Amino acid sequence: MAAAVVWRRGAAWLRSCRGNRELPGVPRARGCAGSREVVPTCERYAVRRLPFARLADGDVAFFERLMPGRVITGEEEVKPFNVDWLKSVREPQLALRVPCFHCRLQPAGVEAPDNGRGVSDSQVLADGSALDCLTSLRKDNTGYDLKQLFIGSEGTLGVITAVSILCPQRPKAVNVAFLGCQSFAKVLETFTTCRAMLGEILSAYEFMDEKCMELVETHLKLSSPVADSPFYVLIETSGSNSTHDEEKLHNFLERAMASGLVTDGTVATDEKKIKVLWSLRERITEALTHEGYVYKYDISLPVGKLYDLVTDMRARLGQSAKNVVGYGHLGDGNLHLNITAESYSHSLLEAIEPFVYEWTARCSGSISAEHGLGFKKRHFIHYSKPHEAVLLMQQFKAMLDPKGILNPYKTLPSAPDRSAC
Amino acid sequence: MAAAVVWRRGAAWLRSCRGNRELPGVPRARGCAGSREVVPTCERYAVRRLPFARLADGDVAFFERLMPGRVITGEEEVKPFNVDWLKSVREPQLALRVPCFHCRLQPAGVEAPDNGRGVSDSQVLADGSALDCLTSLRKDNTGYDLKQLFIGSEGTLGVITAVSILCPQRPKAVNVAFLGCQSFAKVLETFTTCRAMLGEILSAYEFMDEKCMELVETHLKLSSPVADSPFYVLIETSGSNSTHDEEKLHNFLERAMASGLVTDGTVATDEKKIKVLWSLRERITEALTHEGYVYKYDISLPVGKLYDLVTDMRARLGQSAKNVVGYGHLGDGNLHLNITAESYSHSLLEAIEPFVYEWTARCSGSISAEHGLGFKKRHFIHYSKPHEAVLLMQQFKAMLDPKGILNPYKTLPSAPDRSAC
């Protein structure tokens, strides 16, 4: 595998962007409203570049010496590395291909060695020193648990170069049920029932609303396996005894149908049908990209309030949005709220933010459940973390990366004393 | 609940201890060899006290004002708070009783609210500021995962004041099997078999050697429920369907007995008998304290090598130790190696350490699996962590607790530039 590291080339280019500067403050969308064109990042967001953003010819020559033939400068060759996966913004034309990951995973389903269950990692720090804490031990309480600080830090504290992963036994039996529910209240009640009845074999509880189903049907030509419903639930079980698991699932479904929690459903036990059911849920993101511009929010909330945010947002935006949809990992309290429009619109963004963050904060939720704050949401961290915690994070960042060279402009708001170009 | 915070009282007392100073370096046991007397800490270990170790009358008065009636000075009243739980060392005579924990747990077995599954905590930092990151969300990726740095830091970075704990459903069925094995190789093979056959309901796999059984029989008058064996295994299952679980367990036991992995065994399904079986394993520590002085090591290793350390240590120490025993959480790769003697002996300690740490390091194990390095093992951290990691930990400590007032003399070797009295 290879990753592309992208720099902005040359001071002239940089100067052309700096006129847009509005910092310090929240990055503000600008320009391009109403356009589906993939615009340069600096045209959409005000970003205060740090000194290393200027790439000199000497830098290119250095990397050419280090990794001959891996520096790409051809416009067409570089293009795919320079556009974000949502195709909303792009970067200039220089990329460096570097080897990224070397995976060595224990084959699933065989007896994993008993010392292979721990989780650990190794990093390279900003000063170039290597921090090798890779171990396969499950328990290790010697000093502070440094790896935890790097996990989820989005590369802003160090570059993770090796990971040791807990490999559980491959389940001998996997079942998936895809069900229709008439309300979100029934989705919740079904969850409570299935936690009690499926217990230790429940490995996923996902939900999606009818709008999501419409999108995968329309854009991807997938077919719903159950009767039209306002909500759909996907339940997966993973266990060691297929007879036991099927019996548990059967008992649960009988209860759920008899009590009216679920109005229609289908069950898959063979791998092919399981994949088909999962694709209805997993390809929603792909279907959304066909809609135009997508405003994406990855929120965690107390599950009882999970869908209220979608309903409130839908009411708030009215006709100004094309679609407001909700799906996600209900078992984890994780909602993916997605709002689509024909193209990017600054006024629509202003109707969504900070409303979505304020709403989440009122429910003590997280504005970034699993994907990280990245570039767009770093200035909203205060909606989910107290001031003291952010200050402490900034101190860690300053200590580990005093020059701010590691994945710059991400995760945290800049500390007040950070120098900038 | 209440905790006792103990200070050393007065400069005169401190001066009497400082003659023993040998730092910087590993704390060295001294004095008291051959005696079972509970000696002052400073007589056994060289410890370089920091300035706040001197408690003035003004300090006592301050706490009297803060918490009237909670400062204890009476010799007899204070005694139980001033001796460590192994009754090996004691501290001088002033204690302050402070309220410690206020627990509010979700009642087990009822439907836990779905937002109650996260894990988080709140801390008070060394400068007195509160860091309130308490949340009940399972997923929250806003910034760095600060709580992880505090968990397991033994109070050296902050005082944890509140904890949010993941409460799984209380299992509807619990079974315990207690088995005899003829060799450690069979203990390992039994583990592999039971992981495959019990899968998702396996909640504990513990082992103990025959010496451990002798100790609980001799000192606590417990009876082994199975025929004498070189090794014993305790297996616990926790699930949601007793019929399924008992069938799985029955199938596993049939296989284990038929293949000669296990030579005798008993199974408990009712709570009372389950407790009796668990007590054989859980009361080993208590039985050991009746032996005299106990040298305790909490090691994690690749499970294949777990018992070799006990065998090697037994051969090394010969008659100089009363007993060398091994037991632990085999499922976690965690060995509790315990060595007993009539009384504390410095020469025996020197025969054990650093041999035990060197042995562990050669197998890429951890010298402190679950209990932390504390006071005695902090200078041995390098056997399990690279120099760069220890340096980074010391930087974190210096940043968060520049005066070194939080649980001093624990977890990390002092940084070279730390001032001392």
Image: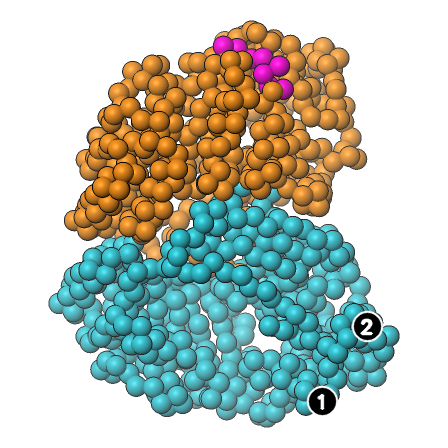
Chain colours: A orange, B cyan
Query: Which quadrant of the figure has residue B201?
Result: bottom left
**Residue A54, horizontal then vertical, whole percent:** 70, 20
Residue at horizontal 46 percent and vertical 41 percent from the top: A304
Q: Residues within 10 Å of mark 2 (few under 14, many from 20)?
A: few
Q: Is residue B354 above or below residue B169?
A: below
**Residue A240, horizontal then vertical, whole percent:** 23, 50
Judge by depth and name the residue closer to the eye, B322 or A148. Answer: A148
Q: Give the alpha-carbon distance from disc 1 to disc 2, as whole Å.
A: 21 Å
Q: Is residue A122 above or below residue B264?
A: above
Q: Are marks 1 and 2 on the same chain?
A: yes
**Residue A125, horizontal then vertical, whole percent:** 62, 41
Residue sitting farthest toward the right: B58
| Residue A343 covered by magenta stretch | yes
Work out which quarter of the rendered image holds the C terminus of chain B and state it: bottom right
For discs 1 and 2, the disc positioned in front in the rendered view: 2
| Element type where label 1 sits in the image | helix
The region drawn magenta spans A342-350
Residue at horizontal 22 percent and vertical 41 percent from the top: A258
Q: Amino acid at mark 2?
A: Arg
User: Relative to residue A170, is residue A161 drawn left or right?
Assistant: right
Judge by depth and name the residue closer to the eye, B288 or A249. Answer: A249
Q: Amino acid at mark 1?
A: Glu
| Element type where label 2 sits in the image | helix
Residue under label 1, please give it.
Answer: B75
Per the rendering, the mark at residue B65 is 2
Query: Which quadrant of the figure has residue B242?
Result: bottom left
Residue at horizontal 34 percent and vertical 75 percent from the top: B275
Q: Earlier in the sequence, mark 1 or mark 2?
A: 2
* Number of numbered discs: 2
Chain of residue at mark 1: B
Judge by depth and name the residue closer to the eye, A110 or A243. Answer: A243
